[in-house]
Amino acid sequence: MVTIYDIAKKANVSPMTVSRVINNSPSIKESTRLKVEEAIRELEYIPNKPARSLTSKETKLVSLVIPDISNPFFTNIARGAEDKALQLGYQLLLGNTDENKEKEAMYIDMLMSTGVDGALIVPASDDSAANMKKLAKRRTPFVYVDRTVDSVPADSVTGDNLNTTRQLVQHLIELGHERICLINGPGYLSNARERAQAFRDTLILSGIQPNPAYMIETHFKQDNLDEIISKFISLQHDERPTAIVAANNFIGVNALRALRSLGIRVPEDISVTCFDDPDIIPDYNPFLTIAKQPAYDMGYIGMQLLIERIQNEAPATTRRIVLPAELKVRASTARR
Amino acid sequence: MVTIYDIAKKANVSPMTVSRVINNSPSIKESTRLKVEEAIRELEYIPNKPARSLTSKETKLVSLVIPDISNPFFTNIARGAEDKALQLGYQLLLGNTDENKEKEAMYIDMLMSTGVDGALIVPASDDSAANMKKLAKRRTPFVYVDRTVDSVPADSVTGDNLNTTRQLVQHLIELGHERICLINGPGYLSNARERAQAFRDTLILSGIQPNPAYMIETHFKQDNLDEIISKFISLQHDERPTAIVAANNFIGVNALRALRSLGIRVPEDISVTCFDDPDIIPDYNPFLTIAKQPAYDMGYIGMQLLIERIQNEAPATTRRIVLPAELKVRASTARR
DNA sequence: TACTATTTTGTTACCGGTAACATAATAATA
DNA sequence: TATTATTATGTTACCGGTAACAAAATAGTA
């Protein structure tokens, strides 16, 4: 391995001078700079970042901790985050928690040990608080994306759950639906809670009494929903929901599958709508009516906030960026 | 920051003893081990990996360099790679080249500087050879996934382009198609070349003379194909292709879009088939007949090979793993 | 020309670990 | 009990850089 000492010898200067050239310190005579650069080129010297980190206390590494890169919503967050990171000279470490807080804890430990300069996190649960506290204690900056853990404050970039839920529900109400059910994520996630609240509020605002039986908590992963759906379907006709709001793309697809397997037609028998696109290619399957959250921007802006914080360019107060979604009315919702 | 020196002081031992406890060296008295572990817990000590890297010459970091995480094919590769890496104690760095060899060069430089222990690479071009040579010179192990750069040998995990292309083409021939066209990736990519070759060979084997006009090179990205497709469509009736093989998922979708915008029906007027699924959720949009390559496995196995190589457990010769694809006949191909 | 200010380069120590060797403590053996 | 193995711990130097200070070289001024 070629080090600054090799360069120094070759260029007949001290290692410190080489270091200065590498970091283009101003007080270097042009002639020595050229001499050193020549040697660097000839020996194909590449600076050793871990060594540098030892004194500089920074690694130029940031971590992205998400539930699952395979969910297009998170894929887009990842792409946005990576683009911004690269642009600002940081490299991105990826971790998939699978919504599991133990796995999350592992990543948090690894990332602190690796000495990343900061982390962009989609927390797995409110119980992630312990993990977040570890980061906070270590003064490793981090930013929440999509969800927050309110007991441990930090900058965040999230969707506007209130208005997005409202858009979805109002769209259904406008189509004449009243018995609308919400298949939500788990209540220990901030976004699921916000969506539940907004769901209730919107119904009430429209003069519809929310029915707790119509609000189900599942999780944000791919799964079989036959049981839940068939329970709805087995209700007598005037009790049966006519529309479903799924709290994310996977739940939406889960619901669609269960309905199909039960022989229920969408949207003829029941309307379905959800948060986020199951497709990563826009409009490849333009069937589901969705509220498309700006996932790429969430990652991009989140990384921006994070790096500002890393570089001490952020205000002392925590910043909460809330981004609107776009309602894409397509074929899975119909007039009642 | 808490260091082994702090622990040493607290536990009344030398730093070296602390180091030994951390690395659970065998020759440590049980009582001191407990004492030290106690101190580690109390002070919440976390080992500093960059410092360790300085002497150990390893970072436990591996890099994944792919064209675009947003392509579900690469998303699955990434997930497979990350799962294996985590399992073997490595962290994954992500880089998107956008099929651009200058961007690739940037990542290669960064990754060498960061001192990753190895890299999993989907090369952007045959001209990536210069980048791969840099890695080889530095003795940074790397493994090709999906594509190879033959001038710089290394382990590889690729799809079985020959047989996969054959499956696709034969499926079309069995449906009575003869004027089949291939919309391929760029000729400077090994997989595109192999697919072109297999395409020609399969036709000849079936007694069909390959028509060079039916073989188009584009690129593996999302793009507008109206021009290319309308050129095909404008051919007189008995010259007009009746089926399209797209060399990847994006090209498949590009073709579908162009056909739709030109008012051509699929599969009534023309059959369409492609490599890889545009969906990441299996069968979410079960329209396109595809050859589904085992992307997750490619990433998983690729990472396995890479880490074996890193740990000097690999044979001296380069290994070439070739994985078969699964033909999923769906709705976009029909009898002629 | 002598002296001071400024620019350029070098020296030393340290970042947080670990390898290699040295020494102290304990156990085994005669 | 003295001597030798063995086990447990400590010392020193180094990994590849850089910060902080020191010294040398050059420029500016009287």
Image: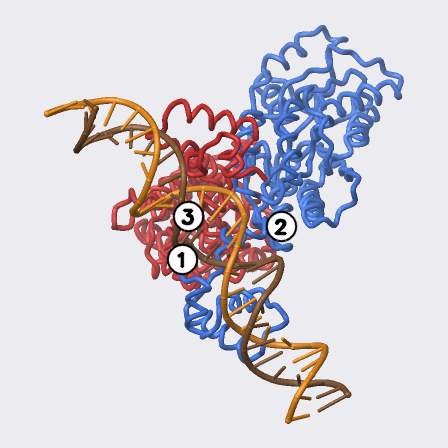
Chain colours: A red, B blue, C brown, D orange
Q: Nearer the viewer, residue B215 or A171?
A: B215
Vertical position of residue A224 compared to residue B73: above or below: below
Q: Are marks 2 and 3 in contact (CB under 8 Å)?
A: no
Vertical position of residue A52 compared to residue A104: above or below: above
Q: Residue at x 73, y 20 (%)?
A: B243
- Asked if marks 2 and 3 fall on the same chain, the answer is no
Point out the frontmost of discs 2 and 3: 3
Dot 1 falls on a residue whose secondary structure is helix
Q: Chain of mark 2?
A: B
Residue A24 image point, x, y percent: 38, 31
Q: Is residue A286 visible?
A: no
Vertical position of residue B66 compared to residue B84: above or below: above
Q: Could you say which disc has been placed on residue A117 in the image?
A: 3
Residue C21 image point, x, y percent: 61, 62
Q: Could you say which disc has been placed on residue A135 in the image?
A: 1
Q: Mark 2, residues whose alpha carbon is within 10 Å: few (<14), some, or many (≥20)? A: many
